[in-house]
Image: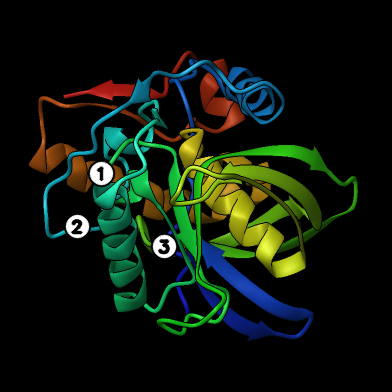
Amino acid sequence: MQSLGGLVQRVASPGGCCIHKQLGWGPAAAAAAQHRRSVQLHAKRPQKVPTVEKLEWQAPLQVIKYPDPRLRAPNARIGVFDDSLRELAKQMFEVMYQDDGVGLAAPQVGVNVRLMVFNETATPGSPEETVLVNPVIIEKGRATDVDVEGCLSFPKIYADVERATKIEVQYQDLDGTKQQMQLRDFVARVFQHEYDHLQGVLYHDRMKAAELEKVRPELLALEEAFIAAHPDVAIQRVPPPAAAKAKGFGSIAKR
C-alpha cells in the first residue's frame, strides 16, 4: 500500500482506486455542528496566520499520532526560502517514502508550518515529486466522489471520505516563486487531504456520521493511549454521537 503521509495508501477497489490518507482540523469545537461550520469556514476563508522567517525542527522526523495537539495547532506561513526549507522538504519525502506514502504535510511530523510534499507515483526521485509552500485553494469544482482514506497519524483506520474531483491551487515553490496548477481526481484528493492538515483538519472531521461511527472505537482507543502516555496534555476528542451530545457530553478532554 502507498501512504500519502497526509494520505495513506492507494489500493485497488471494485469502483476504482482507493486512497488512505491523513488530515487534520482547526480550533476545538464544542459540538459537531459547530465543528462542521468551522471546517467549511476554513475551506472558504482561511484564518490569518503568522509568518516564520526561521525554520527549526528536531531530526529525525517522525510521524505523530492522533490525538497529538500538534495536529490541531495553527500552521504558520513560511517566509524563508533557503537551505533549511529544502532540507525540511527532503526529510519529509524520506519519511513519506519510508511509509510507502504519496503525500505528507509538515504538521504530521510535528512542524507547524504550511508545507506539503507529494508524489503520486511514490517513486523516490521521480519527476512527479512536488513541494508546495503556503498553498491555497482558489477554485473547487462542484463534482465530488467518495473514496477510502486512511492516515499515518491514524494507523490502520480507514473510512470513506467525500472530496472534490477538480481543484485549482496557488502556492510557492522552494525558491519562493508563485505557481498555480489545476489538479484532478486522485492528485486532487491527495492535495485536499494534505491541505486539510495545514488547516488543522483531520480526515475523520470529513466523515459522514455513519462512517464516523464505524471507526469510533479505534479513534477512542488512540485517544486513551495518548492520555495514558500524556495525562497532563489537553486534547480534542472525537465528537460524541448525537444521542450522547443530547445528554450533555462534551468532546474536549484533559486528564
Which of the two residues, 71 or 79, is positioned nearer the viewer here?
Answer: 79
Q: Secondary structure at mark 3?
A: loop
Q: Position of residue 242 (x, y in %)?
A: 61, 28
State which tag comes first along the sequence, 2 or 1.
2
Badge 2 amino acid: Leu
Q: Earlier in the sequence, mark 3 or mark 1?
A: 3
Q: Is residue 100 above or below residue 62?
A: below
Mark 3: give few (<14), some (14-19) or many (20+) Cα within 10 Å: many
Q: Secondary structure at mark 1?
A: loop
User: Residue 239, percent across and down?
Assistant: 49, 30
Query: Amino acid under label 1?
Result: Gly
- Pointer 2 and pointer 1: residues touching (CB < 8 Å)? yes
Q: Residue 149's x, y, as percent?
A: 57, 63
**Residue bearing the label numbered 3:** 5
Q: Which residue is mark 1?
A: 110
Residue 238: image location, x then y, percent: 44, 35
* Residue at the (45%, 20%) spot, across then down: 27
Mark-to-mark CA distance, 3 and 2: 12 Å
Q: Which mark is residue 25?
A: none
Q: Identify residue for label 2.
A: 61
